[in-house]
Image (spheres, grey):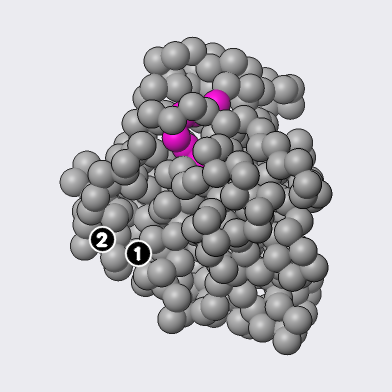
Amino acid sequence: MSPPLLESDLPGLRLIARGKVRDVWEIDAKHLLFIATDRISAFDRVMPTPIPDKGRVLTSLSLFWFDLLRDVCPNHVVTSDVGAMPAEVRAEREQLTGRALMVRRLRILPVESIVRGYVAGSGWKEYKKSSTICGIPLPAGLGESAELPTPIWTPSTKAEQGAHDENISPEQARGILGANAAAVERHSIELYRRARDHARARGVIIADTKFEFGTDPAGNVVLADEVLTPDSSRFWPAERFAVGRGQDSYDKQYLRDWLESVKFDKNGPGIALPPEVVARTRQKYLEAYRELTGVEFRA
């Protein structure tokens, strides 16, 4: 287990942003450095307690998917080899190895691109009321966690840190994305389908996932940020799947459930996590990595 990292510190580089999990530093006009810390968020609140190795798991799993899905659409990764990065980065090799990505600088599109294959989460809450998800009509009589007839694109707004993302209709998203909407929707559905089929063969159900896209100087839509991790997806063990209830998971749903059990104030700050919750959450991330890639994560 490596020492946890809550915030990266890179003298000589300019900090662009600290997100819920990632720190973004400027390398030059064409490249950024993405660093996956061990911060964890739930209900759009960052907890003050880190999850050891979480950032390294996210980075390694994202690289696995970027490679597996590279023929679906281009992605922003230049290299994950700290030794091939600028001197300011190499000097911090100890804290950054396994959690740093040098990426192409993109114009990030202002929509979270969510694909759902199953009725879960906020989708289940809406479906119970109106038989729709994000305003999309669906067949009547679906139970909680049921598989949808076909995956659906259900985008959301991209909120500032501390605010909540809001589901929007595909029509609203198309209005925001303009000429890029068709490519974003097409790539999102195909990425999900390909990942879903890979995961199924390994005994894992990907219930839903969130993608982020940007455009390069030539106007091409490019896959960015993280891909198909426990932070951005719901992963369920297929052998324990049953329609009509919530599912066991390999993602941070465990943490969300624990926070609900202690009546966490979703409008307040994050709270300290007890050691047993940290350990169980870390184990969920390691299980997700093992089941999806077929190898144990090397901490």
Instruction: Specify the principal SS of the magenta part.
Output: loop
Residue 75 figure quarter: bottom right
User: For the point 54% across and 54% down, which residue is it?
Assistant: 82
Q: Is residue 148 visible?
A: no
Residue 201 figure quarter: bottom left
What distance separates the C-alpha of mark 2 from that of mark 1? Answer: 6 Å
Q: Is residue 96 magenta?
A: no
Say the numbered circle drawn on residue 71: none
Q: Is residue 51 magenta?
A: yes
Q: Is residue 285 visible?
A: yes
Mark 1: few, some, or many residues within 10 Å (few <14, many ≥20)? many
Viewer-proximal residue, 85 or 129?
A: 85
User: For the point 44% across and 35% down, which residue is it?
Assistant: 53
Q: Label 1: which residue?
A: 196
Q: Label 2: which residue?
A: 200
| Rendered location of residue 84, percent (x, y) | 55, 61
- Count of labels in the image: 2
User: Circle 2 — which element?
Assistant: helix
Q: Amino acid at mark 2?
A: Arg
Mark 2: few, some, or many residues within 10 Å (few <14, many ≥20)? some
| Rendered location of residue 11, percent (x, y) | 76, 41
Q: Amino acid at mark 1?
A: Arg
* Residue 164 drawn above or below residue 78: above
| Rendered location of residue 221, percent (x, y) | 64, 78
Give the magenta-colored segment's residue range: 50-55
**Mark 2 vs 1: CB contact within 8 A:** yes
User: Circle 1 — which element?
Assistant: helix
User: For the point 36% across and 37% down, which residue is it?
Assistant: 299
| Rendered location of residue 253, percent (x, y) | 45, 35
User: For the point 55% across and 37% down, which residue is it?
Assistant: 95
